[in-house]
């Protein structure tokens, strides 16, 4: 169960990390990195940030680069939150592939509709 303090810090870190990534990806044309969620440990020492990368085929490469530069990103974050937090948590970045997962499910459902045209309509009329 996340405490109110953890939730507030998570939102603050998400907002500030999003701004940092927006500034950094402005230099990389055609790449968008968004922070979908931040989870903070109960002792506030570790923050796990879940990133969504577009286009998704560059996600692994971008995530490796971000993890390689985690200390620099933490320093930038510390500068932004120095008046709200005494100690900036260690950062761990993970890929949030939930959008890819949803897209895959959507594609599978569309394939099923294409493979069985009218089948779904018949079920709906049988139930009515």
Image (cartoon, rainbow, N blue to C red):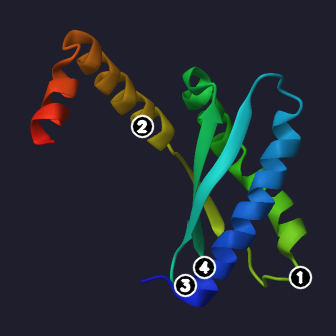
Q: In the figure, residue 89 lies in which quadrant? A: bottom right
- State which tag comes first along the sequence, 2 or 4: 4
Label 3 Cα neighbours within 10 Å, binned few <14 / some 14-19 / many ≥20: few
Instruction: Give the distance between the C-alpha atoms of the residues marked 3 and 1, in whole angstroms.
Output: 19 Å
Label 4 Cα neighbours within 10 Å, binned few <14 / some 14-19 / many ≥20: some
Label 2 Cα neighbours within 10 Å, binned few <14 / some 14-19 / many ≥20: few
Dots 2 and 1: beta carbons under 8 Å? Answer: no
Q: Residue at x 61, y 23 (%)?
A: 58
Residue underneath mark 4:
7
Give the label, 3 or 2, closer to the camera: 2
Q: Tell me, yes or no, if residue 44 can be seen here.
A: no
Q: Residue at x 68, y 45 (%)?
A: 34
Closest to the observer: 91 or 97? 97
Residue 26 in the image: x percent, y percent? 88, 34
Residue underneath mark 1:
83
- State which tag comes first along the sequence, 2 or 1: 1
Give the label, 2 or 1, closer to the camera: 2
Instruction: Give the distance between the C-alpha atoms of the residues marked 2 and 4, in whole angstroms.
Output: 26 Å
Give the quarter of the figure containing the N terminus: bottom left
Dots 1 and 4: beta carbons under 8 Å? Answer: no
- State which tag comes first along the sequence, 1 or 4: 4
Residue underneath mark 2:
102
Q: Secondary structure at mark 4?
A: helix
Residue 94 in the image: x percent, y percent? 53, 48
Q: Tell me, yes or no, if residue 61 can be seen here.
A: yes
Give the label, 1 or 4, closer to the camera: 4
Closest to the observer: 81 or 2? 2
Residue underneath mark 3:
43
């Amino acid at each position: 169960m996340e405490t109110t303090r953890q939730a507030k810090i998570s939102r603050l870190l998400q907002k500030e990390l999003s701004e940092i990534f927006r500034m950094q990806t402005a230099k990389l044309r055609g790449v968008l990195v968004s922070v979908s969620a931040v989870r903070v440990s109960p002792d506030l020492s570790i923050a796990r940030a879940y990133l969504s990368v577009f286009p998704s085929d560059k996600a692994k490469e971008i995530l490796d680069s971000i993890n390689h530069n985690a200390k620099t990103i933490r320093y930038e974050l510390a500068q932004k939150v120095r008046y709200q937090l005494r100690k900036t948590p260690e950062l761990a970045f993970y890929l949030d592939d939930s959008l890819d997962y949803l897209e895959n499910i959507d594609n599978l459902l569309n394939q099923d509709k294409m493979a069985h045209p009218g089948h779904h309509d018949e079920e709906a009329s049988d139930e009515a």
